[in-house]
Image (cartoon, coloured by chain):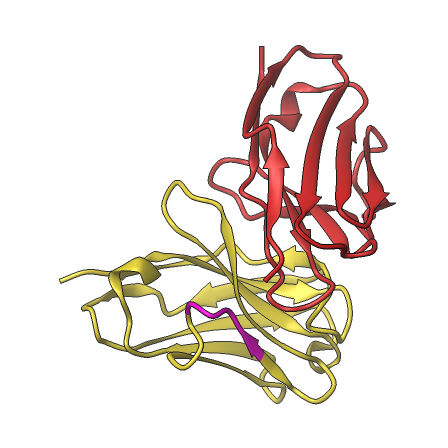
Amino acid sequence: EVHLLESGGGLVQPGGSLRVSCAASGFTFGSYAMKWVRQSPGKGLEWVSAISGRDSSTYYADSVRGRFTISRDSSNNTLYLQMNSLRVEDTAKYFCAKSLSWAATDGFDFWGQGTVVTVSS
Amino acid sequence: DIQMTQSPSSLSASVGDRVTISCRASQGINNYLAWYQQKPGKDPKLLIHGASSLQSGVPSRFSGSGSGTDFTLTISSLQPEDVATYYCQKYNSVPCTFGQGTKLEIK
């Protein structure tokens, strides 16, 4: 059974940094693309970043490019999102999701429960 | 970037009704479209991918259609457990943009 568990969320001041993680199990982690999606309180879903399953190519939304870095560690089946220069508008629940395939451009068939990041002074 | 627009933003229907939700892309995306269901406080669930392929385990009352720029999610007979917000998402290229969501309630 596929299981995704996010962690690392919390309260951070504007301009600060935070790293969120997603522990994956139940599938061959290195063979699939993985994504981060966020949802601000009471709002819709926003695609944030993706990393492919073949060559670990990375992709970012314009709103986070240059500030966020996605990475994966296939030795311990964990996905990361390093978030720097955080802004108030980055406040959201961050979900990790598994792709249907190795491609970063594919649907998401499993999601974690999310971890909440709050950026506030 | 390609924009995804859903309509309506919200709707109310009775149990047993046929419900349709529309999604329009600002440019053609072939059939690279998915539909997700998100119940309050829960993570989203994949319903449809490839515009019309039903994800394993999803009830057959859900169906998807369309190609190019216009897509539709149909619930053939609305059930109480279908109360949720529904999102379309394009994935032909990054960014894999979501629509703004359609909130479905029971009348």
Q: In which quarter of the image is residue A50?
A: bottom right
Q: Can residue A44 be seen in this view?
A: yes
Residue B94's quadrant in the figure? bottom right
Q: Where is residue A17 in the image (x, y as percent from the top left)?
A: 28, 77
Q: In this view, does B93 lie above or below A72?
A: above
At horizontal 69% and vertical 67% (from top left) the residue drawn is B93
Residue situated furthest left in the rendering:
A121
The percent coordinates of residue A16 (x first, y second) are 23, 76
Q: Chain B is drawn in which colour?
A: red
- Name the residue: 70% across, 61% down: B91
Residue A33 colored magenta? no
Q: Start and end of the magenta stretch? A: A59-63
Residue A104 placement, left or right of A73: right
| Shade representing chain A | yellow
Q: Which is the main secondary structure of the residues drawn in magenta?
A: loop
**Residue A61, percent across and down?**
50, 69
Quarter occupied by residue B95: bottom right
